[in-house]
Each structure stands twice: as structure tokens, then as C-alpha cells.
Amino acid sequence: MARQTKVLQKDNIDKRELGYYYTPPFVADYISKRLLSLNPKGKKVLDPSVGQEELLNNFFDAKKEVDGIDVYQHKDNYQSNFSQQNFIEYYSTIKQKSNNEQISLFEDSSEDNGITFRNGLPYDYYIANPPYNCHEVNYIRDNKARLKALFGNVGVHNMYSMFISSIIDVAKNGAYIGLITHDSFLTAKHHTKLREQLLNECTIHEITLCPNDLFHEQDADVRTSILILQKGTEYQGDVFVSNRPSSTQAFKQQLAQQLANFATSNYKAYQLNDITLTSSRDNSELIIECPDDVKVLFTNERLGEAYRCVTGISTGNDKLYLSEKKEEPFTVPFYKNPGKNRFFTDNYIYLHKDFLTFDAEIKNFMVRNKSLLFQPGITCSSMGVQFTACRLPEQATYGVNANIICDDEDAWWLLAYLNSELVTYLVRGILIRSNMITSGYVSRIPLLNLTKKDKTTLSDLAKNAYQKAKDDHSYEHIQQEINQIVNELAEISEPTIAMIRHFNLDLIKNT
Ligand SMILES: C[S@@+](CC[C@H](N)C(=O)[O-])C[C@H]1O[C@@H](n2cnc3c(N)ncnc32)[C@H](O)[C@@H]1O
């Protein structure tokens, strides 16, 4: 690591712009061993973001023919055939030539001649830790229109998603692909098309989530996972998946154990169907270790099918239009994200009473869903890892967090349900592991089939908890009762309840 830091500092290159976070050696060892054991006989390897060849030692030892690409030359002597170029530009060039011309990656290599892109590049293995940077990076900003045309529906959200998409595209049938990458693509809505590409064009052998402290030494707080894929869907058999471990220390042992278990075929096998949400109401999310008794709930009616689930007002300039104090002209209660509050929130301020005029006259002052303003319901948290819900009273407005509009009768039992440990897991463990919980995600929460009596029981508990929260008293025991009833009504088994509790205990580490 000292060497890496030195090289980067010496050359004064922007680590963030390049997205350079090196792969810890034990992870590099694991991914390369997995690829080599899945296909011991392959010949050629490509690392398209090769850095200082951190991922390649086992391929060199196995005497494979290794090519490396990087936009920057990070050292003087490479053991691989190194080509300094931008991999995305390289992809763009061969894509343009794909229909007719033969292509060659390394000008001095005659071996590549005769390969047409239609059949894929001649590599048996791809291994990569793609650059970790997002749409704000200069390269994406400056080339947006061209990249959008190149990546079509997959989009240009960040470098790693473009790398994954292009590696899948250029790989020949049967080639193995080993990645360690940011895992926002598992559930984020904007990566739906990337997931579809992955599922339509690849076999998934493994998704192992990495601990979130894996890159802390390098001052990066990124949630990553190891992906082992194979081009072509016809190879699909069992899938190995594994949730996030608590620490890098535990992860080292876990990976060693996984290698031993694969060697003896001694692991819990999932089917592709177990790890994907494929109904038309979902977005092909990749779900990790979701128990059957939870997954089956996704066949139920969803929240957004029963109630309007919406966002409200964004002012474009809160300082101008919102006030902490109720004084003319700031007279309309405006509910903000309830944050950590549950059941009851007093997290509201006051909106300028002429807000509808501003909406009509000011471009970035937006009032969405006007017909649903001033109606009662539930207001949900959007930021942070917790998912919480509080009553939204009548005659109030709200911001861009998710709000559910429903009458009092439904609002109370729904409030109990949304604050249950089961729903926290449904939201943070399944629907969206990575970013803000927008109304789109909340509207996909499965509902339970409840009788009138069940609803009354839950409503009474929610009212009780609401009063306690309002009086600033503990509602812990009521919350526990709600959990117990919701788990029973949803027919969640004891082992699953234990798993959910463990998951919810430390959402920061586990999501
Ligand atoms: C996350 S680092 C991985 C380095 C190394 N392969 C490893 O696993 O430790 C990403 C690498 O991608 C390179 N990179 C960034 N943008 C690139 C691009 N457009 N084409 C090729 N390489 C790029 C960076 O210079 C950096 O070396």
C-alpha cells in the first residue's frame, strides 16, 4: 500500500478522479482462485482497469497470457501486456467496428487478428475492480451524449456500471468474469437495465457481499461485492450468495472457508429464482439470502396498489420559503423527513402561504400531487439507514420524502405495520440496500392479508405507541408486541425472525 500511495502522490494524480482503490490482496487472491478453479484450462486474461496488477498474481503463476488496460500508467514495468488506454473508449471503438471489421486490442499482437466483436473478445477470463466514481467525474460529464448513445438504456450513472456493462458485452460465450465492485447495482432503480443485461446475458455463479470497512484503510466508505459471472445463460446452475460480514477480519476467514467449501461442493445452493425479484411490479432486484417465507410476501398486494404513495413540495430554496417560526406569511405546516422518529413526529416547520402561486410562477419551485395535499396519512423517513413511519395529520403539506395518503382507519394499522421489524428488513434488506428510500420503493412494500380484527389490534397498538412517543415516553414494549403480531400474521418462522433481528441490529454494517 505504501508503494501505491507513493506513486499516486508522486505523480500528483487525482485518486478520486481515477477511482483508484486497490483490491486488498486476500480478495484478489480469492477472485482469481475462483476463476481458475471454475476454468483451469483457459488461456487468456484481461484486466481492463489493471492499476498495478493487484488482481493478477495467480494468473501469472498459472502461466496464463495476461493483458492489462489502464487509462493511467501506474508503474514502470508490467508483467502483463500493458496497454495504456481508456477502456470505455476502447469499447466504443470496437463496438463501432463490431458489424464488419476484425479487431485487435494490441497493435503488435497478431494473435488477436481475425476476431470479430460479434463473437466476443478472445479472453477466457475477465477480472476487474472497476473505477469507483460516479456521474460527477469529468470524463462522464464531458462525454455524456456520446456515452449515453453507447450505453443506451443501461445509462451512464457511474464508471463501474459502464465497465460491468461493457465487459459483459465484449465477453465471448463461456468466458468467466470476476469482479469486485460497488454494489449499488443490486437494488437501485436506476440500475434496472444493467441488472436485466446481467440476467439476460450471463450466468451468475456467486454474489458475495463484502464488509463495509473493506476500503476504510484507503479512506473510502464503499459498499462492495464480489461477483462471479459467466457469459451466456446456459451455464446457470446453483448460485452461491452471501450477506455482508461484520468486518474485514471476519471476511478473511469467510473467504478462506468459501474456497474450501467450493472444493468439496459443501455450500448452501440457491437457484437464480431465489435471488431475483422478477414480477412485473419489481425491477429485477438481486436479493441476497432472502428466506422463502419473506420472499413469498412479494406475491401479495403492494402498498402502492392500495394507497397513493407520493412526494410533495420542493421549494428550490428552503431559506426563502420555509420558516421555523409560525409567523405571517409562513403559516402552512410543512412536514419534513421524520428521521429517527417513529409513530409521532413534530419535525415540521412552516411554508409560505402563497406556495401554489410560486409553483405556477417559479421554475424550480415544485408542488407535486396537488390534489393530495392537506390530506391525512403517514409520512416516512427517506434518508439514513433506518426506515420509520409517523402519522401525517390533516391540513399539512410535506416535502420530498415518501408520504402515504389514507384515511384514519387505515393509517393506524398501517403505521404499526410500517414500524415493524419485518418491514425494516423488507425495505433495507430487499427493496433498497443503497440509497434514499423514495416513494417508489415504499410503494412496493408488500402488504399482509389482514382481517378486520387484525387491523383493529394493530391500530390500537399504534395509537398507544403514538401517544407514548408524543409524551416522550418509551414505546419499546408496544413495538415488541407489534413485531410479534406482524411476524405471526405474516407467518414468519423463528429462524427467519432471528435472522431479521440480527440484520436490523446493525443496519449500517448489514445493508
Ligand atoms: C479501483 S482501481 C483498481 C486497481 C487494481 N486493478 C486493483 O484491483 O487493485 C481502478 C483502476 O481503473 C483505472 N481507470 C480509471 N478509469 C479508467 C478507464 N476509463 N479505463 C481504464 N482504466 C481506468 C484507474 O487508473 C485505476 O487503476
Image: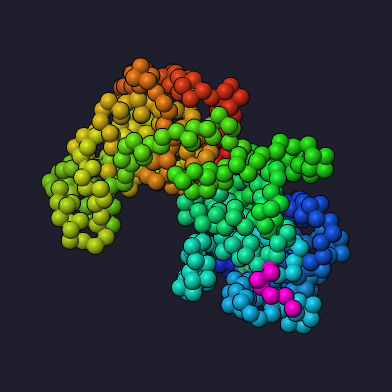
Q: Is residue 502 left or right of residue 468?
A: right
Which residues, given as a range, are shown in magenta? 114-120
Quadrant of the rendered image containing residue 201: bottom right
Looking at the image, which residue is at 48% across and 62% down?
Answer: 153
Taking the magenta stretch, the answer to whether it contains residue 117 is yes
Q: How many marks?
A: 0
**Residue 51, horizontal then vertical, whole percent:** 69, 66
Q: The C terminus is located in which quarter?
A: top right
Looking at the image, which residue is at 70% across and 56% down?
Answer: 230
Q: Is residue 222 left or right of residue 490?
A: right
Q: Is 49 above or below relative to 212?
A: below
Taking the magenta stretch, the answer to whether it contains residue 109 is no
Q: Ligand 1 is located in which of the four quadrants?
A: bottom right
**Residue 251, horizontal then vertical, whole percent:** 70, 42
Observer able to see residue 249: no
Q: Residue furthest left?
A: 328
Quadrant of the rendered image containing residue 338: top left
Looking at the image, which residue is at 48% across and 29% down?
Answer: 421
Looking at the image, which residue is at 21% across and 34% down?
Answer: 394
Using the image as rendered, state which of residue 134 and residue 188 is in the foreground.
188
**Residue 422, horizontal then vertical, whole percent:** 49, 29
Using the image as rendered, state which of residue 226 and residue 132 is in the foreground.
226
Q: The N terminus is located in which quarter?
A: bottom right
Observer able to see residue 88: yes
The colour scheme used to paint the residues is rainbow
Using the image as rendered, state which of residue 452 and residue 81 is in the foreground.
452
